[in-house]
C-alpha cells in the first residue's frame, strides 16, 4: 500500500503535462481534404473558382459567385487504415465512421440591374475540417529492449516518491521496476529482461467540425469579397494498449493509456477573388489563428503485471487550457471555359496554402510546462505548405472531376521528432462525378490520402529502429443540393 499512496500523490501534482503536448497542438491545427463532393472531387482547388459552399471555410469570397439560393446535405463515409512493419513483422487495422457534413444553406440576394454590386450572399454551414478516426496495430519481436528500460533510464537519480506516476510509478508499484541495493533508493533496474514479443494497439476517433457564418458580395462580376466567422468544435479520443510478453519466467504486462479532449474555438476568414477577364480568376484568403478553449481534457494510464498478478492505476487528471493555432495564407488561380449554356464547359484551379506550425502556442495553468512545450513546438515544427490542383469537365448536364493535393511535412527534422512520431508528406488523389439540373444536383466523390509515418512506441534511444507505418484515409461522399 505504501507504493500506491506515493503514486496517487504525485499524479495529482504533475499529471497535466501528459496531454498538452506538441503533437496535440499539431493535431488541432491541421486540416484534411473534406468538404462537398464537388470540393473533394477536385482536391479542394476552388480558391479562385468559388461557386461551392465549402468556400466558406477556405476562401469565403467564392460564395460571391452565387446568384441563386441553395441548400445542401452530404452523407459521408470515412475509413482510416494503417499497416505497420516492426522488426520485420507486419500488422494492419482500420476504423470507419459515418457523418453528415457538410450541411449548409446559402441565401443569395441579387440587386437591381443598374447596381454595381450584383448580388450579396449569406451562408450558414456545418463543415468537417479534419477526421481523427483510425486504428493502428503493431507487433514484433524486439531482441534487445523493453519499454521499462526507458522508464529506468528516466528514473535514475529520483526517489520513489518522485517517479513519473503515469509510467515508472506504475512499474515500481507492480514490481516491474525496483531499486538497486546500496544506491540509496535512487538507482533502479527492470525485471523485464531479454527479448520480448511487443505489440501496441490503439484506436482514435473524433474530428474538427466547424459552424460557419459567412457574408459575401459580387462587385460588377469583377471583384468578389467574403468573410466567415468560424466556430470549430474539436473532439478527440485515443485508447492505447502496449503489451510485452517475455518467456522463461520473466514478467508479461499490458500498459494502457486513455486520452479525451474536447474544445470550442473561434476564428475569422477573409478572402477576395479578382476576375480580370471572362476566363481568368485570381484568389487570396487569410485565416486568423483559431483560439481554442479546451474545456474537457483528461488523461489516465494503468498497468497490469500478469507475472505478479498486480494492477496499478493512475488517477484521471482533468484539465482546462487554451491553444492558439497558426494563421493561414492562401493564394489561388483558376481558369474557366464555356458557360451554363455550352455543351462542353469546364474549369481548372491551382491553390497554395501556407501555415507556420512553429507559431502554435499553449496557455496553461502550469507556467513551467507552458514554457517547455512552447519551446518544443518552436524547435520541432516549421512552415507547412499545401498544394492543390484540380478541375472539372461539364458535358451537357454531367460533370466529371479530378484532383491532387500535396500536404507538406510540418517537421523540421525529417528523421526524428521529439514527440516520438514523425510524419512525412501526405498525398491525396481524388475523383468525382455529378449531375446537375435547373433546381437540384447530385455529386459523388472519392478521395484517397496516403502518408508514411515513423512511429516510436517508446524512446528511440532504446528501440533502435522505428515502427514503419503506412496510413491511408478513404473518403466517400455524396452531396445532394437544391436551388431556389
Image: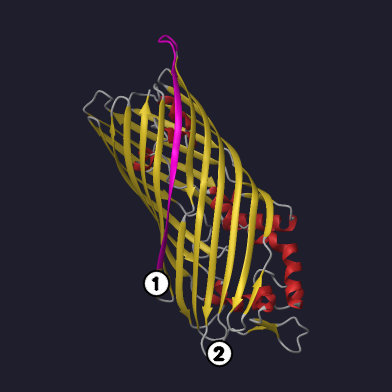
The residue depicted at 44 percent of the width and 68 percent of the height is: 468
| Badge 1 element | strand
Q: Which residues are magenta?
A: 92-115
Mark 2 Cα-neighbour bin, 10 Å: few <14, some 14–19, many ≥20? few
Which quarter of the figure is the C terminus placed in? Answer: top left
Is residue 81 toward the left or the right of residue 207 in the image?
A: left
With 106 as the anchor, is 368 left or right in this view? right
Q: Is residue 273 visible?
A: no
Residue 409 pos. (x, y %): 48, 55
Residues under labels 2 and 1: Cα distance?
A: 27 Å
Mark 1 neighbour class, 10 Å CA radius: few under 14, some 14 to 19, many 20 or more: some
Q: Quadrant of residue 444?
A: top left
* Location of mark 1 (residue): 90
Q: Nearer the viewer, residue 327 or 205?
A: 205
Residue where numbered disc 2 is placed: 249
Out of 469 and 167, give the one closest to the viewer. Answer: 167
Q: Residue at x 64, y 51 (%)?
A: 296
Amino acid at each position: 500500500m505504501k507504493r500506491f499512496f506515493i503514486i496517487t500523490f504525485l499524479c495529482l501534482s504533475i499529471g497535466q503535462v501528459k496531454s498538452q503536448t506538441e503533437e496535440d497542438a499539431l493535431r488541432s491545427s491541421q486540416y484534411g481534404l473534406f468538404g462537398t463532393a464537388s470540393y473533394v472531387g477536385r482536391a479542394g482547388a476552388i480558391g479562385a473558382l468559388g461557386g461551392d459552399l465549402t468556400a466558406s471555410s477556405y476562401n469565403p469570397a467564392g460564395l460571391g459567385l452565387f446568384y441563386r439560393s441553395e441548400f445542401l446535405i452530404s452523407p459521408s463515409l470515412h475509413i482510416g487504415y494503417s499497416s505497420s512493419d516492426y522488426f520485420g513483422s507486419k500488422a494492419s487495422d482500420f476504423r470507419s465512421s459515418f457523418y453528415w457534413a457538410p450541411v449548409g444553406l446559402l441565401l443569395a440576394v441579387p440587386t437591381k440591374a443598374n447596381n454595381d454590386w450584383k448580388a450579396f450572399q449569406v451562408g450558414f454551414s456545418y463543415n468537417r475540417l479534419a477526421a481523427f478516426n483510425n486504428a493502428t496495430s503493431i507487433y514484433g519481436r524486439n531482441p534487445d529492449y523493453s519499454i521499462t528500460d526507458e522508464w529506468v533510464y528516466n528514473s535514475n537519480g529520483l526517489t520513489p516518491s518522485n517517479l513519473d506516476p503515469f509510467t515508472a510509478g506504475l512499474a515500481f508499484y507492480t514490481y516491474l521496476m525496483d531499486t538497486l541495493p546500496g544506491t540509496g533508493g535512487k538507482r533502479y533496474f527492470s525485471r523485464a529482461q531479454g527479448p520480448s514479443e511487443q505489440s501496441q494497439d490503439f484506436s482514435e476517433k473524433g474530428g474538427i467540425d466547424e459552424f460557419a457564418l459567412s457574408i459575401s458580395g459580387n462587385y460588377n462580376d469583377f471583384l468578389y469579397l467574403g468573410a466567415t466567422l468560424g466556430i470549430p468544435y474539436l473532439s478527440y479520443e485515443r485508447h492505447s494498449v502496449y503489451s510485452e510478453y517475455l518467456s522463461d519466467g520473466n514478467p508479461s504486462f499490458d500498459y494502457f493509456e486513455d486520452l479525451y479532449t474536447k474544445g470550442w474555438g473561434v476564428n475569422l476568414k477573409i478572402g477576395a477573388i479578382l476576375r480580370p477577364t471572362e476566363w481568368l480568376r485570381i484568389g487570396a484568403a487569410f485565416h486568423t489563428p483559431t483560439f481554442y478553449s479546451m474545456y474537457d481534457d483528461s488523461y489516465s494510464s494503468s498497468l497490469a503485471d500478469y507475472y505478479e498478478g498486480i494492477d496499478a492505476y493512475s488517477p484521471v487528471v482533468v484539465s482546462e487550457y487554451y491553444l492558439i493555432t497558426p494563421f493561414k495564407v492562401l493564394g489561388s488561380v483558376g481558369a474557366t471555359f464555356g458557360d451554363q449554356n455550352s455543351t462542353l464547359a469546364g474549369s481548372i484551379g491551382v491553390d497554395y496554402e501556407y501555415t507556420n506550425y512553429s507559431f502554435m502556442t499553449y496557455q496553461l495553468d502550469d507556467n513551467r510546462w507552458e514554457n517547455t512545450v512552447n519551446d518544443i513546438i518552436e524547435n520541432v515544427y516549421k512552415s507547412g505548405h499545401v498544394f492543390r490542383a484540380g478541375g472539372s469537365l461539364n458535358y451537357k448536364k454531367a460533370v466529371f472531376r479530378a484532383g491532387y493535393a500535396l500536404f507538406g511535412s510540418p517537421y523540421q527534422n525529417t528523421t526524428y521528432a521529439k514527440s516520438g512520431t514523425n510524419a512525412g508528406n501526405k498525398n491525396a488523389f481524388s475523383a468525382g462525378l455529378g449531375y446537375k439540373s435547373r433546381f437540384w444536383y447530385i455529386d459523388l466523390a472519392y478521395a484517397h490520402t496516403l502518408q508514411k509515418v515513423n512511429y516510436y512506441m517508446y524512446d528511440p534511444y532504446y528501440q533502435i529502429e522505428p515502427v514503419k507505418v503506412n496510413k491511408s484515409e478513404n473518403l466517400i461522399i455524396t452531396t445532394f443540393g437544391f436551388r431556389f
